[in-house]
Structure formats: structure tokens, C-alpha cells
């Protein structure tokens, strides 16, 4: 499977989560396109086209849970290139000290924008210890398993949205 992992990271925490996700995907035999949205554009990283089987997007949260401009730019470029992909998984890092309503707000906003059926991964500050490593691996495994199911049979990550 071709997987695109794109992220933005202020302090390196989100980059560390992205590295763990990439390592697991590659360990499982998938081809990964790696985009640090702080340094690269979609066009720079995908000279052979932006079409992938799965898109994994990660972000830290800015100013009260907002999405940083670098990730907004990347998402705009992605939608312009391929439309809104159906298979999008989202992860984020954040700090609950700024309030639960802002914690991983960018990840929540990105997931809502894409209407993703995949569960979100939210990591408090930086990934550390066996617990976070296991959480990231299990999340990645769950996302990869869901990516192999027909999209119409994939349970929605936020069932309440299905009743709107």
C-alpha cells in the first residue's frame, strides 16, 4: 500500500510520533512518502503524483487548538491535487494544561474537515515510554487494518456524526 505521512511539528514532538508511525508502516512492508509540511510542499515531495492509498496527517495545535498555517497550506494543496481523500487518518500532540477544549484541537479539526472514519491518535506532549510506544503501534496497526476494508463498511470514528 502507498501511504503518505505529512506532519507539522513545532518542538519535534509531532515529528517523533510521525517517525514511529512511519517505522511501523515500513516494518509492515508499506511504501511511505514522508512530508515535513514545515519544510516541503506536496508538489516537492510527490513528483510522481499525490495519489496514495492512505493519507496520515499529524499536527501540533496552535493558539487555542487551531491548526498551524503550514498544515492548512498542505491540506489546501492536497485537496487541490486529489480532492478530499476518503482514507485519512489523523494524529496530534498537545498539552492538556491549555485546557481539554484545546487539547489536540488541530487533530480534531483536521479529522472533522475530512470526515474521517479512522480513529484519531492524541499524544500528550511528547511520546515517551513504553505506554506511548504501544499506543502508537496499536493505533497504526488499527489504521492499516481499516485501510484494507471497503470504505462503505468502515465504522465511523465519530458515530454521532452519522446521525446528523
Image (tube, rainbow, N blue to C red):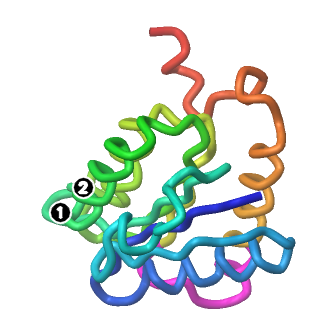
Residue 41 is situated, as x and y percent measured from the top left of the image, at 31, 70
Q: Is residue 126 left or right of residue 146?
A: left
Q: Which residue is mark 1?
A: 69
Q: Against 137, is 88 above or below?
A: above
Q: Secondary structure at mark 1?
A: helix
- Coordinates of residue 76 in the picture (x, y in percent): 27, 48
Q: Nearer the viewer, residue 29 or 115?
A: 29
- Residue 133 at x, y percent in the picture: 70, 81
Q: Residue at x 63, y 29 (%)?
A: 156
Q: Which element type, helix, strand or loop, lies under badge 2?
A: helix
Is 129 within the magenta? yes
Assess disc 1: are there few (<14), some (14-19) or many (≥20) residues with their C-alpha within 10 Å of its C-alpha.
few
Q: In the rendered image, which quarter is residue 26 located in?
A: bottom right
Neighbor class of circle 2 (other Cα within 10 Å; few <14, some 14-19, many 20+) is: some
Magenta stretch bounds: 124-134
In the displayed structure, 161 sits above or below 156; it is above
Tell which residue pokes out farthest to the top in this image: 164
Q: Would you say the residues marked 1 and 2 are in contact, meaning their CB atoms lie under 8 Å apart?
A: yes
According to the picture, the residue beneath numbered tag 2 turns out to be 72
Amino acid at each position: 500500500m502507498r501511504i503518505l505521512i505529512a506532519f507539522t511539528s513545532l518542538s519535534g514532538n509531532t515529528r517523533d510520533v510521525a517517525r514511529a508511525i512511519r517505522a511501523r508502516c515500513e516494518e509492515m512492508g508499506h511504501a511511505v512518502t514522508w512530508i515535513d509540511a514545515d519544510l516541503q510542499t506536496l508538489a516537492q515531495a510527490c513528483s510522481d503524483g499525490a495519489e496514495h492509498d492512505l493519507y496520515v496527517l499529524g499536527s501540533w495545535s496552535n493558539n487555542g487548538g487551531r491548526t498551524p498555517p503550514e498544515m492548512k497550506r498542505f491540506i489546501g494543496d492536497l485537496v487541490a491535487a486529489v480532492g478530499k481523500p476518503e482514507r485519512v487518518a489523523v494524529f496530534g500532540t498537545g498539552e492538556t494544561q491549555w485546557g481539554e477544549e484545546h487539547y489536540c484541537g488541530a487533530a480534531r479539526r483536521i479529522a472533522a474537515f475530512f470526515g474521517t472514519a479512522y480513529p484519531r491518535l492524541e499524544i500528550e506532549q511528547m511520546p515517551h515510554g513504553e505506554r506511548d510506544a504501544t499506543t502508537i503501534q496499536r493505533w497504526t496497526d488499527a489504521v492499516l487494518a481499516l485501510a484494507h476494508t471497503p470504505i462503505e463498511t468502515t465504522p465511523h470514528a465519530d458515530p454521532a456524526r452519522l446521525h446528523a
